[in-house]
Image (spheres, helix red, strand yellow):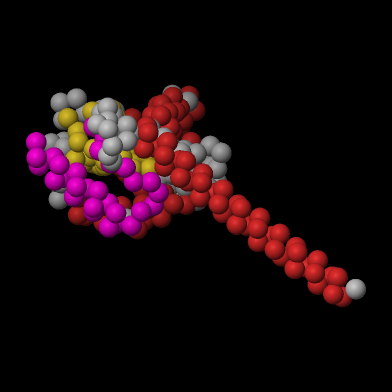
Amino acid sequence: MLIGLGLVAVALLAYGQNRSVARLDSEVEALKESQRKMAVGLGEVRGGAKPEPVYIDVSHAPAIGPDTAVVTLIEFSDYECPFCIRHFQSTTPEIEANYVRTGKIRYVFRDLPIDDNHPKAIRAHEAAHCADAQHKFWDLHPRLFTRPGTHEPAALEARATEAGLDITAFRACLADGSTTAAVRASAAVAEKLGAEGTPAFFIGLRDPATDRVRIIDFLNGAQPFSAFQRALDGAIAEAGKK
């Protein structure tokens, strides 16, 4: 009897391991498919047949860095995404110090709240647009990268007060829902390009006259600073050829 139970235990263990392996394989395949879709959405910018240019219009998006900078880093992010928060805390300061404040690139922030994972994140993105209406986006922006469930109205108003916003106008902006369409439109652009997760980064060359960025590379997820160095230095080199 004990031998029989032992065999059952071994069988169950093997079954569980097989299920874990199968699940892991499934997740890897899903990641590969996501990356494939992104490559297709970008016109397969990394090689093969000469692709059709892909552009992102950043004319109405919050940006820092010199207006004359051609190389542009566009981040599609979710204020409640743990990987986005990690990137903001650990990698963004290095990018800003080495590339933005030195005048080498222009950095643009775009919205991509993932409703399935963080259904309340859109509130933070709407709040950011309300801050932008008061020319206070970059004052509120760093205060919005917080864990899921921390963007209730009272918390947002407290952060807006810290950022120096007119709270009466801020409250009215959030209440009328006027910024929701802009958030959804930004997310639609990212999804069209194949970005199915956050953070997603598109690197390209911007025409200062039109604010349209021709995409030449992308990075998916919270990559180390070295990955951004390679991509940005490559874009800077390409910009120098023109």
The x, y position of residue 118, in whole percent, is 53, 42
Residue beneath the point at 34% across and 46% down: 219
The residue at the point 39 percent across, 37 percent down is: 38
| Relative vertical location of residue 37 with respect to residue 59 in this rendering, above or below | below
In depth, the one of 175 and 226 nearer the eye is 226
Q: Is residue 179 visible?
A: no
Relative side of 50 to 196, left or right: left
Which residue sits furthest right? 1
Is the residue 17 above or below the residue 41 in the image? below
Residue 235 located within the stretch drawn in magenta? yes
The stretch of residues the image draws in magenta is 213-242
Q: Classify residue 211 as left or right of residue 6.
A: left
Is 178 in the magenta?
A: no
Q: Nearer the viewer, residue 128 or 80?
A: 80
User: In percent of the image, x 22 and y 48: which residue is there?
Assistant: 232
- Image quadrant in which you'd find residue 186: top left
The picture quadrant where one finds residue 105 is top left
Residue 126 position within the rendered picture, expressed as x and y whole percent measured from the top left: 44, 33
- Report the quarter where the N terminus lies: bottom right
Q: Is residue 30 visible?
A: yes
